[in-house]
Amino acid sequence: MNYFELFEIPESLTVDPVFIKKQFYILSRKYHPDFFSNELEADQTEALDKSAAVNRAYKIFTNPELTIQYFLQLKGLLVEEEKYQLSPAFLMQMMELNEELTDAKATADTAKIKELEQSIQQLQTEIYEPVKEIVEHYQSGITTEKELLQVKEYYYQKKYLSRILVGLH
């Protein structure tokens, strides 16, 4: 089931959070299993499946990174458990960053750790810039696969940086 179709929105790399919330409440009521208790078992099962799909879709659409991930998977550009190879330049930068973090943690240098955390957040902003227009203004049939592959690179870089940030805390 395509979650964009379920929520009656065009396929996109971003969604309107206000609309998603409204649509979630509408669909939650529409497919709530309690309203199907007197229906045929097949209808009850379908309502239960749709209710679960509404909840999964809402979880995805309320998280920008999950929305990008879902969209890329839908387009066949991202495969679960994919062994994606990030660029050597990015990986070298991450190796240096990890070394600095290891040193800062070993010496309990909280000021350096805080500085590195800010650097990572700044880096997340920097890696978004080249794909910002693509993500925010995706148009079916106009946005190219090459552009979507740039978004895929961003997705994996952001995921890598997020894991480092989680490791800081």
Image: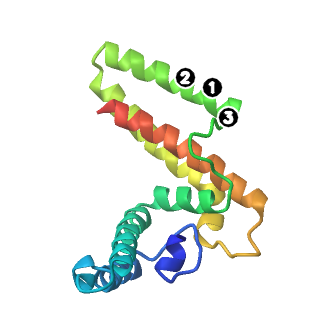
| Residue assigned mark 3 | 85
Q: SS class of the residue under badge 2?
A: helix
Report the amino acid beneath label 2.
Glu
How many marks can you see?
A: 3
Q: Give the answer, above or below, for where 27 lies relative to 1.
A: below
Horizontal side of 6 relative to 77 (left or right) equals left
Q: Would you say the residues marked 2 and 3 are in contact, meaning their CB atoms lie under 8 Å apart?
A: no
For marks 1 and 3, the one nearer the N-term is 3
> Toward the viewer: 89 or 65?
65
Q: What amino acid is labelled 1 in the image?
A: Met
Between marks 2 and 3 in the image, the one whose residue lies nearer the viewer: 3
On screen, residue 145 versus residue 29, left or right, reads right
Mark closest to the chain's N terminus, 2 or 3: 3
Q: Where residue 19 appears, x then y in whole percent? A: 40, 82
**Element marked by disc 3:** loop
- Which residue does the image show at 70% across and 29% down from the upper left? 88
**Residue mark closest to the camera, 1 vs 3:** 3
The answer to whether residue 26 is above or below residue 113 is: below
Q: Are marks 1 and 3 in contact (CB under 8 Å)?
A: no
Identified by mark 3, the residue type is: Gln
Q: What is the x, y in percent for residue 5?
A: 53, 78
Mark 2 packing: few (<14 Cα in 10 Å), some, or many (20+)? few
Label number found at residue 92: 1
The residue depicted at 74 percent of the width and 69 percent of the height is 143
Looking at the image, which residue is at 38% across and 33% down? Answer: 115
> Helix, strand, or loop for circle 1?
helix
| C-alpha span from label 2 to label 3 | 18 Å
How packed mark 1 is, by other alpha carbons closer than 10 Å (few <14, some 14-19, many 20 or more), is few
Residues marked 2 and 1 touching at CB (< 8 Å): yes
- Numbered label attached to residue 96: 2
* Residue 52: x %, y % from top left: 35, 67
